[in-house]
Image (cartoon, grey):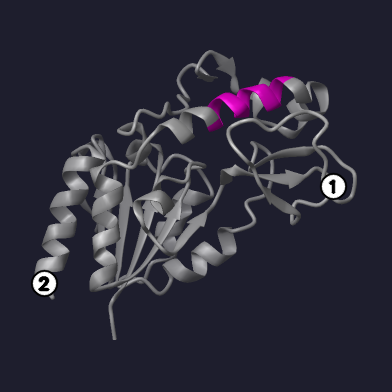
Amino acid sequence: MKQKVVILTGAGISAESGLQTFRDSDGLWEGYDIYEVATPEAWDRNPALVQEFYNMRRKSVLEANPNDAHVALVKLEEKYDVTIVTQNIDDLHERAGSTNVIHLHGIITKAQSSKNPNLLYDIDGWELKMGERCALGSQLRPHVVWFGEAVPMMETAAKISSKADIFLIIGTSLAVYPAASLKDFVPYDSEQIIIDPKADTMSLNGIRAIAQKATGGVVKVVDELLARI
């Protein structure tokens, strides 16, 4: 039986594909106040602005390409049972070829009903327009989890993390909850590795820290894991 590898990825892995990350320090995302574009209240107040913001993000995602870190993780599937749990709303893992990806915060290439979040639709291209409606007649919104909303895939991700033989953390400072709590579900005797430029400054009990960007660190670790089997 293949060992189970669970991989938690954050904004750092996509940043090397040119996608901007949200910076907590100034509360801005590419010049936008995050609470004006990424909360249910923002949608209620100005849905057109929110739609425009995510249309621009979607355009950037579609123009970006998977990088060496995304591609390296696909190779792990040759010898391991791999599940990727990502905080990112892009589809770069899928486009690289990973076959088992859980999106904690949704995926920007899909739309959802404003009335029923379980009604999902693929978006053709980068633009989701005002006036496009679901089968229930409500405006379609981006399929992303906004600040203040529940994280519906969290329970699934926690169950999978509890079965990890190897747990990799890539490109995240473990500051975003509830995603950061997934490490607490990992069995105590499992191998845990974090790859992040600031990894050596974090308080990480029992977690091996590799203070590198994703492309360099992930390729190194993947080669190491593949060499074991």
| 136 to 198, vertically: above or below | below
Q: Position of residue 159 (x, y in %)?
A: 50, 70
Camera-side residue of 74 and 22: 74
Give the labeled residue for mark 2.
228
| 102 to 81, vertically: above or below | above
Say if the magenta span includes residue 191: no
Residue 115: mark in rendering: 1
| 3 to 103, vertically: above or below | below
Q: Is residue 204 visible?
A: no
Quarter of the N terminus within the rendering: bottom left
**Residue occupying the point 31% across, 47% down:** 170
* Left or right of 135, for residue 195: left
Name the residue furthest top.
31
**Residue occupying the point 17% across, 55% down:** 221
Q: Position of residue 21 (x, y in %)?
A: 43, 28
Tell me the kind of residue under disc 2.
Answer: Arg
Count residues near mark 2 (Cα–Cα under 10 Å), then give few for <14, some for 14-19, many for 20+.
few
Q: Position of residue 2 (x, y in %)?
A: 28, 80
Count residues near mark 1 (Cα–Cα under 10 Å), then give few for <14, some for 14-19, many for 20+.
some
Quarter of the C terminus within the rendering: bottom left
Give the distance between the C-alpha atoms of the residues marked 2 and 1, in whole angstroms.
49 Å
- The mark nearer the N terminus, 2 or 1, is 1
Magenta residues span 49-58
User: In terms of secondary structure, where does tag 2 sit?
Assistant: helix
* Left or right of 38, for residue 229: left
- The mark tally for this picture is 2
